[in-house]
Amino acid sequence: MNLNNALRSVHVVLTLLIVSHVGNAWASYRDFDIPPSNATVDLRVFNVANMTLLNDTHAFILPTLPGHQSVEYPMYSFLLEHKTSGTRMMFDLGIRQDPENTPPSASFYITEGIAKFEPYKDVTQLLQNGGIDLASINAVIWSHAHFDHVGDMSKFPNSTNLIIGPATDTSVYPGNPNATLQASDFAGHDIVKVDFASSKLIFGGLKAVDHFGDGSLYLVDTPGHVAGHLTALARVTPTSFVVLGGDAFHHAGQARPRPLFQKNFPCPAHVLEETKTSISTEFFWSPGSRIGSFDILSRAQALLSISNLPDSVYSDPIKASVSLDKITSFDADPDFFIVAAHDISIRSAIPYFPEYINDWKASGVKERSVWAFVEASNPAFVFDSFNTN
């Protein structure tokens, strides 16, 4: 072994030792001061649509490498059923069937040819095709008020309440020419704003509200992407949660890898070997890397960051980054599985309606999927550069 390789090996060992002793290694949901409870919700996932945004990657993630200027995103929507009360709720709705009929601030993506869609049915059609009566949906929760999350509330009966973050901009077009919403998004529905201000619950530095009062569903304040953005912790077994991440991040590489994550979810050997040459050292580096050979083990921060460019989709990139830092604490814990609204890296790994995602932990979904984003065969892979010409 030559001197450089010997020094590199020593450095990697020291890095792993440091990582293993950084902070408190989350080992249980109880480490977040979340109270124990046997109350749970059943959770099912829809992938409402798959959207490709042309030449727009830079508005979501940085760095944007040559050849990856366009980005494809799924749109997840969630059906929650509270076991005790029988209440049914939706968390996010995805996109409506006719997105060209949204306000200009959203419809220009379609009219200008920026957004392309595979054929899809909106979530109301998916629900009804699956035997779910729309009248049985007691409430819809919006993570935030963007066109790819709010769906078409006019298709739900007036008995369906709408739950939103307290800072959500409820102005409508055309009264506000820049509004993302229109009158039909609210007409006939009772609007409930989540009261984070009076809640004393704080999990991982994030304000939370116990929606049902029994610990089965917590709504969590995660500002930054847009005013009023919220996420949720859905307790699907007494000791495990699915984090409904909304747009807290758009790519798994904005959340991973981080020291605690690497400690609790070591990168599989075959992926580790692949990333040595698949991840470009012209754009990504770590203390253990050398030119042409990336070392993910010594990477202490996420590979990608939240876009802070003038046309960023994050209205406050600094707040969004802080919220993301807090969310990633859940990501590093074995009791939590994050499903962000557009995480394409897990699209082929998670079960969809009519199946339930409740047994994600027992079935090993997290272990199988959390490193998929750095596999070159995964549609989330954006870490090499190539000339499309």
Image (cartoon, rainbow, N blue to C red):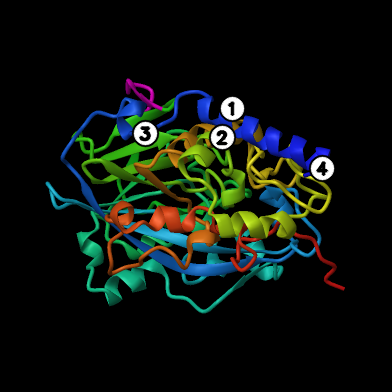
First reached walking from the N terminus: tag 2 or tag 3: 3
Residue beneath disc 3: 27
Tell me the kind of residue under disc 1. Ile
Residue located beneath label 2 in the image: 259
- Res 115 visible: yes
Residue at 68 percent of width and 49 percent of height: 61
Residue 131 relative to residue 377: left or right? left
The picture quadrant where one finds residue 47 is bottom left
Q: Position of residue 272 (x, y in %)?
A: 61, 54
Q: Residue at x 77, y 54 (%)?
A: 280
Kindly check if marks 1 and 2 are in contact, taking CB atoms under 8 A apart as contact: yes
What amino acid type is highlighted by mark number 3? Ala
What is the secondary structure assignment of the residue under circle 4? loop
Q: Are marks 1 and 4 in contact (CB under 8 Å)?
A: no
The quadrant of the picture occupied by the C terminus is bottom right
Residue at the (47%, 57%) spot, across then down: 369
Where residue 223 appears, as percent x and y from the top left, is 52, 34
